[in-house]
Image: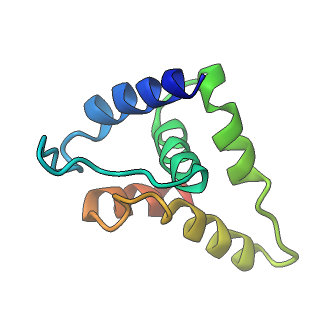
Amino acid sequence: MKTLSSLFLTAALIPSLGSAFSIDSLNPVKIKNDEERLACEAIMCLSSPGSSPAQCEPSVRKYYSIKFKYGHDTLTARRNFLKKCPVSDNKDVAGMINSIVR
């Protein structure tokens, strides 16, 4: 199942966010843990138009489970979750994160 998730992540990141990532075969983006993987998947799933496939359910559930008493705290925590994706420092991806977390 992890292979399927990795394949889905790779297949979805390249076409939709390819310009945002500097893809270098000698220096690929390393996802170190499940939190980073979920953050990257959430960016892909929430930025894609239309309904999300079933593979998006865990990452989208994680994103929407982040709730605080005050709305601004919720938005800040959700933004911080999405910033756990290793490529979130890229200006295009950062713009996508800001669009998602409005």
Residue drawn at x 76%, y 61% as measured from the top left: 66
**Rendering coords of residue 24 (x, y %):** 12, 46
- In the picture as drawn, the residue positioned furthest to the right comes out as 69
Residue at 48 percent across and 48 percent down: it is 40
Image quadrant assignment for residue 53: top right
Expressed as whole percent of the image width and height from the top left, the position of residue 39 reads 54, 52
Question: Is the C terminus in the top left, top right, bottom left or bottom right quadrant?
Answer: bottom right
Query: Is 28 drawn above or below residue 91 in the view shown?
Result: above
Total numbered labels placed on residues in the image: 0
Residue located 27% across and 57% down the image: 92
Q: Position of residue 94 (x, y in %)?
A: 37, 63
73 left or right of 83 in image: right
Compared with 46, 87 (above or below) is below
Q: Is residue 18 left or right of residue 101?
A: left
Q: In terms of depth relative to the viewer, which is nearer, 49 or 94?
A: 94
The N terminus lies in which quarter of the figure? Answer: top right
| Residue 95 in which image quadrant | bottom left
Q: Where in the figure is residue 32, as x and y percent of width and height?
A: 47, 55
**Applied colour scheme:** rainbow
Above or below, comparing residue 27 to residue 4 in the picture: below
Residue at 73% over, 70% down:
74
Front position in the image: 29 or 67: 29
Question: Would residue 10 appear left or right of 36 to someone viewing this image?
Answer: left
